[in-house]
Image (cartoon, rainbow, N blue to C red):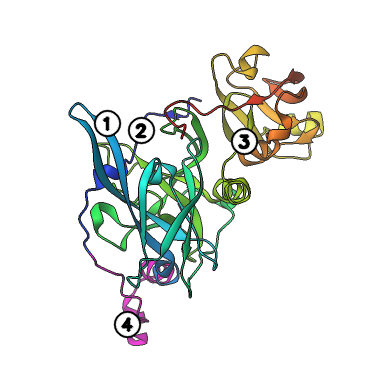
Amino acid sequence: MNTEVVTNVVDPEDSGNSFGHSPINSAPADPNDDGLLDAYSHAVTRAVETVAPSVVRIEVTQRRNTPRGPREAGGSGSGFVISPDGLVLTNSHVVHRAEKIAVMLPDGRRPDVVLVGEDPESDLAVLRIYAPNLNAVKFADSSRLRVGQVAIAIGSPYGFEATVTSGVVSALGRSLRSQSGRFMDDIIQTDAALNPGNSGGPLVNSRGEVIGVNTAVILPAQGICFAIASNTAQLITGWLVKDGRVRRSYVGIVGQTTPIHARLRRHYKLAQSRGVLVAGVEPGSPARLVGLREGDIIIAFKGQPIEGVDELLRKLVAAEIGRPAMLTILRLTEKMEVPIVPQELIQSEASAN
């Protein structure tokens, strides 16, 4: 299965500099109106009331080279508060190479802000703002998502603050190229409408828990939008808060979480029900050198079971760079051990600071 999707990652400059202040009315719904709301509307309303106080608007100023020489360009995006002490999660492409970053809270405050760290390879960045009385979101476990469940996006498209769109989770396990050219794995596809300026905002479930970070759309298609899964976002956030960057090893595959056929599980007495499908192999990568192929399913790394893309990423930490390891794979019906040496993932010039 080819999971590569050719996309246009939303560029914050395209969002313009309009500043349409239209905050969400977070006043409690009139109990007398509850009977007029169907179950879907009621779920969306409650989710928005829960998460809207955590969503922020981000404005940036960048210096860009043009045929007429360097010039300043303004752009905007979205983000959301993930901790009471002021950590804000957004997209890397929203703040990348920004000379100035400003954050506006739903109540109109503009606190001081610093960039904690960014990771262009996963298109995530963490900011810290200095303000009291912040509302932090709650994260959901994205591994438990199901196609068809409600998905709600909140952000500031084209400068229209606190805009809400809703839809469903259209597909799971997509792969998407970041602006650095690397693949991001385990991406959520949704038909909740996204536009320039939505980048970095939350995608939430009906309980108001974050299931993803809105990141990209296909232009000019309608209803094909993408978000970084919440489990990946939490993993990357931890590294950025700790080190300001993500130093990682890689094997060079495009991966997708996939179920393992019941016959293979019984035959090889596997306790796990899922693995990582190799949907693509990067040229010159460790995976290409050892002969991994599209269609292989990775089920273990160094003898430890691997049940999904996020789990494999957790194993490929900096300590694995240059150290021989063993991948256990299923190739058609055969179980194989493949020796591999993970290498350091080097940011491309397009993504380097």
Mark 2 or mark 4: which is in front? 2
Task: Name the outermost residue toward the front.
Answer: 69
Q: Estimate how packed mark 1 is, as few (under 14), some (14 to 19) or many (20 or more) residues with alpha carbons within 10 Å.
A: few
Query: Residue 322, located in which quarter of the rendered image?
Result: top right
Image height check: is 322 above or below 140? above
Distance in Å between CA atoms under marks 2 and 4: 41 Å
Distance in Å between CA atoms under marks 1 and 2: 24 Å
Distance in Å between CA atoms under marks 4 and 1: 54 Å
Q: Three-letter amino acid code at disc 1? A: Asn
Q: Estimate how packed mark 2 is, as few (under 14), some (14 to 19) or many (20 or more) residues with alpha carbons within 10 Å.
A: some
Residue located beneath label 2 in the image: 7
Relative side of 344 to 172, left or right: right
Q: Residue at x 59, y 28 (%)?
A: 345
Q: Three-letter amino acid code at disc 4? A: Asp
Q: Residue at x 49, y 66 (%)?
A: 207
In this picture, which residue range is highlighted in magenta? 21-47
Residue located beneath label 4 in the image: 33
